[in-house]
Amino acid sequence: MKQFKIRRILLERGAEKDSLAQKIFKKLPNIPIENVEPDELALIEDIEEMDKESLRIIHFNGEFLKSCPGTRRYICCGYKILNIGINCPMDCSYCFLQSYVNQPSLRIFTNLEDRLNSIGEVIDSFPDSIFRIGTGEFTDSLSLDYVTGWTDFLLPFFSNRKNCILELKTKTSFIKDLIKSSHRERIVVAWSLNTPRIIANQEHKTASLKNRIIAAGECQKAGFVLAFHFDPIISYQGCADEYEETVQLLERYINPESIIWISLGSFRYMPNLKWAIMKRFPGTNIFNGEFVPGLDGKFRYFKPIRVEMYAKLSERLKKWYDDLGIYLCMESDDVWRQSLGWSPKNSAGLSLYLDSRVKVIFG
Amino acid sequence: MEKKAFKSTPLQVEISDIDLSPGPFCMSFNFDLEPLKDSIDRFGVLNPPYLLKKSDNNFIVVAGYRRLLALRELGWQDTVCQVLPDNFPPLKALLLNLNDNLLHRKLNNIEKGMVLKRLTSFLNTEEIVANFMPILDIPANRQTLELFLGLEELEDTVKVSVAMERLSLRIAGLIRSIGKDDRLKINDLFTSLKWSFNQQWETIQWIIEIASREGRPIKEIVDERQIIEVLNNNRMNKPQKVKAIVKILKARRFPSLLETEKLFKIGIFNLSLPSGIKIIPPPFFEGIDYKLEIVFTKGKELKEKLTELSNLSGLEKITDFWKGAEHG
């Protein structure tokens, strides 16, 4: 997998002195830098195009650590998002950011390193809680690591804390810098997985399924704990056989014993995302399934279809190994029961379950 | 704003010397000439058309295109026109006509598209969005501009449907990207019956998604036997036909949902609920809460119905009916 092309750096006023900004300038010495104002409004067309070749260096004044925006109508995992940046250089057709972001470009928050201490204070002030933190919600955790060096400072920072884990979620095979690090404790490296067909047709510019799994295997051999996310699961004719192929590849390259969890989530979307996707990917077939409005306003596959997909996939995964920490992302109690045969009942219950997985794997 | 008068010369012009094809300043589409012909017949031409002289000494219409067409149809040989100076700027000529039109009538969406398209020869996108879209009563943004600019590429039959507001603008935008045969078929379907714009929007999505899922052309989906039978059914009126077609397409688009709805209806029917009592499933069966509706006029009647209901056997069988359906 090749590194992504960065055409220009947009330097927001106020970010020039941030430590991470300085590092990025050194790593990209030949990329032109344009100075921009923080409050400059973007044209709607530029937002729609997402401008994935410009790196915008931002001194971020908002909260770096946020709760995952779940909804009370479905069971949420209680994940915390470490907001390192927004947008990613890959281009998945179904990406929710297409209707979520209100600014274009790859937005990197360069005062992150300078703000780590205050994030640490929050984590340390709740010693009895387990913070499951991820950086892969609004961007890909590793896709720009070669530019930002996120793992250089995030791994040592989180490895030293006993009441948290850091999950790096990716669709790349960029693990070289990660493996060089000496920190393994409390770090989870996770891959989003799908069928080869979905990866080829919908997950543009991402690593192939095989390369993702090979990269995961290398990380595992290097001592990292792994996680996988089958999300979004997309229903199409023959998809069951193709998800089977994906599981077979996992069986071939991965030892299941040190997998902390595997999540399953079906494709879901807010109504306005559909039009953003249709515009950027005309002729896409990802809306061909039977989608109905969910309790949170997002469209989801009709419930029996979701239940069937989850049941089949989880059954198959359990055949591989019975203790994979399988959970559902944003599903209701009855879907849990119907598809997995048990339910954590509510978000608090799912948090407890995932916390218990952390304790089992990391102690 | 600085006011600048322009000089034009009145001239008796032969109608045959005027190019009456829709020229670069024309913004008229799908109009009825009869009322205008009738007015001219009775009162003559109240406002003279404006023309520009072409290099071949013939004339091009700046304003008054419809008046001139009416005159030709009425058999007039000549009329008095105002001829603009040879060096009259084309943008100014276009604005003159726009001003003339906006003062007298409401432009239809195709005509608005014509105005915007013509403006693109002289002005940049930002100027058009900021200064002209509001005048035309169109949301001022680039996406809407793109939508209007694309209208001119559509076939005349589709343009007529848009101009007459029988086909929604949104649908016109959406069907621009599909093949001509498919587009004309959709236009036929939506204009042969009386569809609301919301119905059109929902239905077009289903048709496109069914076609995509089945790997078939849109035309084939619309031409299916069941739909043709509805269209040819003389015992149904237009709204009934629309309803029937929506039902057919919904069943194709959402087979599992429809199967579940059917199972639910059978399940409830088998309970033999007392009259005036209804069980309502969660919307799309997504939630888990069913609702009970009891219609009554007096408390005594309510009490009787509740007793009847509580004695009814089989209520405990109300369950997730979808579990019995085949999916995927």
Image (cartoon, rainbow, N blue to C red):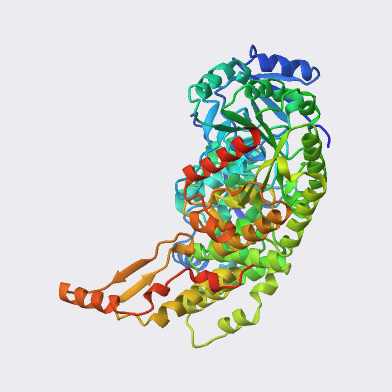
The number of numbered discs placed on residues in the rendered structure image is 0
- Farthest top residue? A17
Between B328 and B108, the one lying in front of the other is B328
In percent of width and height, residue B126 lies at: 60, 35
Could you tell me if residue B75 is visible in this image? no
The residue positioned 60% from the left and 72% from the top of the image is B326
Q: Is residue B179 left or right of residue B277?
A: right
- Farthest bottom residue? B235
Between B328 and A269, the one lying in front of the other is B328
Q: Is residue B55 left or right of residue A273?
A: right
In percent of width and height, residue A311 lies at: 63, 60
Q: Is residue B122 left or right of residue A122?
A: right
The residue positioned 61% from the left and 69% from the top of the image is B327
Taking B126 as reference, is A10 above or below it? above
Between B97 and B245, the one lying in front of the other is B245
The residue positioned 64% from the left and 33% from the top of the image is A362
Taking B84 as reference, is A195 above or below it? below
Taking B238 as reference, is B210 above or below it? above
In percent of width and height, residue A79 lies at: 55, 37
| Quadrant of the image occupied by residue B268 | bottom left
Q: Quadrant of the C terminus of chain B?
A: bottom right
Could you tell me if residue A170 is visible in this image? yes
In percent of width and height, residue B246 lies at: 53, 72
